[in-house]
Structure formats: C-alpha cells, structure tokens
Image (tube, helix red, strand yellow):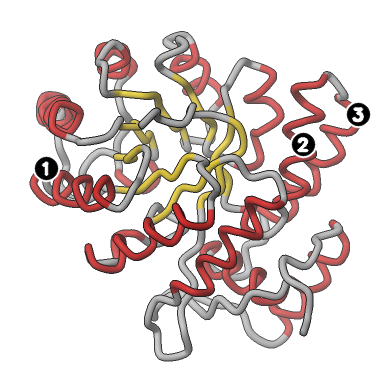
Amino acid sequence: MSVPVLGGLVAAVATPRRPDGTVDEEAFGRLIAALTARGVQGHFVAGGQGQGWLLDDRQVAGLVSAAGAAAGGRAVLCGVTSGSTKASLARARVAAAEGASHVVATPPLGTGVDDAALRAYLVELSEESPVPVVLYNHPARTGRTIPVALAAELAGHPNVAGLKDSSGSMLSLCAYLALRTDSFRVLVGHDSLVLAALAYGCDGAVASTANVIPSLLSELMSAATGGDLVTARAVQAKVHRLRMFDEAAFVAVVQQAVTLLGIPSGLPPHPTPTLEGVGLDRLRALLDEIGAERLEQAA
C-alpha cells in the first residue's frame, strides 16, 4: 500500500472524552469526518493535543482505527513519544497494525538525554518502525531540541519522512527547511506561524486550531500557496487570536470549542485547567467573532 504524501493541512486531533473520562471513539470518528469534509488533508492522533501520553495502547489502537475509517485514505499520523525506546517502538507497532501511515516522535520525555543517546533512540526507532517516522522538534515539551546535524543525518534515512517543528522559532524552522527534499518534508507545528512558514517553503502545517476552524485553516493554506496575501494575512490573524486564547490549557480550549461547535468532546483529565463561566463565554464570543462554523448541525 502506498504511503500518503506528508504535507498540506494536518489536524493535531483532540481526543474526545465522555463525562466519566473514558475515550469517546464515536465522537472522535465524527470529528475526523467533519475535519476531512472541511479540507483537512491529514490527521495527527495521540499527539500533544490528543494527550497521547495519557492513552494506553488499546485506546491508541481504537483512535487510529477510527481515524482511518473516517479519513478517506488521507494520512493518519500517530504520536509514539514516550520515555523509552522500547515503549515508543511498541506504540509504533500498534499504530501501524491499525493502519497509521506515519508515526511521530519527539525526543524521549523526562529522560534528559544527551545528543548521543538521542541519536541512538531516533536511529533505532527509524530502523525498527513498521511505517515511516516523522521527527518532532518540541523543546518546550521535551526540554531539548533535535540538533540540525542529527536531523540532517536522519533526513537521508529511507524510513524517515520528515520533521515537524513546534519550536515557534522561525530561525529554527529555517535551519530545518535547509534540509528539505521531496523525501524529507518539513511541517510547521505552530498555528500562528503558518503563513510565514509556507512563505519560507514549508510543505504544510500541523495545527491544533484545525479542530475548531478547519475551513479557515484550509482557506489560509489555499490563499498562501495561491499568492493571495491579503486574504492569507486576514485569516492568519483570526487563527492567531484563537491560538493565543490562554484562559485555560489550550488542549482544554480546543476540546471545549469543539463541543460548542456541535461535537461533544468532554474535558481533558484532571488536573488540566479548563474553562467555565465567564471564560467559556469569552471563548464562545471569540468563535463568533472569527467566524467559526459548526462542525455538526444541531439536531
């Protein structure tokens, strides 16, 4: 089976939960279908927005399977970040067995790895993963970067498909873009930098806000790649307003926004800060102001 091309608009998909805290695969499938219908070209599950570190392998398997069923042949990426090579490889095998097209890996969590240990981890993952690996640079979460020299080495590996940079730094992104080839694609992972990243030659964007405003993100991508900077700047400003809404943890903001837009998604597990009262009213008002459309119509 051919591997979908890595690029375009990829949603960093939320993990809906029922009131009792269990994963709601039915709502997840509805969300994937709604995003696909609004221009999303790939789905990244069990990543940061999906709080993959809180999911067990059975839950991840269910999400990957549900995503594949609703994604219409589009790329399904699965996060495999953990604290050990063994655990990351185990998750990669689970994801591949359920149809994931790629797996995505940051440096190991909570281990304080040096460059040599990080190289050993990513090389073994690349050698052993049943599906192509996407490197994930997210220093705010992992406490370290993926060195450009290591990315350059891995860019030539036949089982490494590209890199997602969520550093929020254009200098960092430009360094990785210098490594870009048709077989090693570079994606921006910060929603506020989509327009700038595309202007510099990124192959696409992985965006948490795509759960909430997929049509706007799709419009931004089309306008940016089509040279309509007036439209692209206006839409990017709307995306930025949502991304900077900081009255709760952003994973909660996204889930609660998805609920407001028609697909009940519950809340992230405690103690993740969530919105209530006035904060939820402000989010509802912001969604109206930026033109967020309902993901599903009310019955």
Please provide percent x and percent y for residue 35: 64, 54
For mark 2, does the 10 Å Cα neighbourhood hold few (<14), some (14 to 19), or many (20 or more) residues?
many
Q: Residue at x 64, y 85 (%)?
A: 276
Amino acid type of disc 3? Val
- Local SS, label 1: helix
Q: Residue at x 17, y 33 (%)?
A: 125
Residue extending furthest front? 1
- Local SS, label 2: helix
Name the mark on residue 220. Answer: 2
Left or right of residue 133: residue 91: left
Dividing the picture into quadrants, the one containing residue 137 is top left
Q: In the rendered image of this protein, does residue 94 appear above or below residue 75?
A: below
Q: CA distance from mark 2 to mark 1?
A: 37 Å
Name the mark on residue 85. Answer: 1
Please provide percent x and percent y for residue 285: 83, 71
Q: CA distance from mark 3 to mark 2?
A: 10 Å
- Mark in front: 3 vs 2: 2
Residue extending furthest right? 230
Q: In the rendered image of this protein, does residue 252 appear above or below residue 134?
A: below
Q: In the rendered image of this protein, does residue 223 appear above or below residue 298?
A: above
Q: In the rendered image of this protein, does residue 42 appear above or below residue 262?
A: above
Please provide percent x and percent y for residue 167: 47, 35
Of marks 2 and 1, which one's residue comes earlier in the chain? 1
Name the mark on residue 1. Answer: none
Amino acid type of disc 1? Thr
Amino acid type of disc 2? Leu
Name the mark on residue 230. Answer: 3
Residue extending furthest bottom? 20
Q: CA distance from mark 3 to mark 1?
A: 46 Å
Q: Residue at x 78, y 74 (%)?
A: 297
* Residue nearest the observer in this picture, 80 or 141: 80
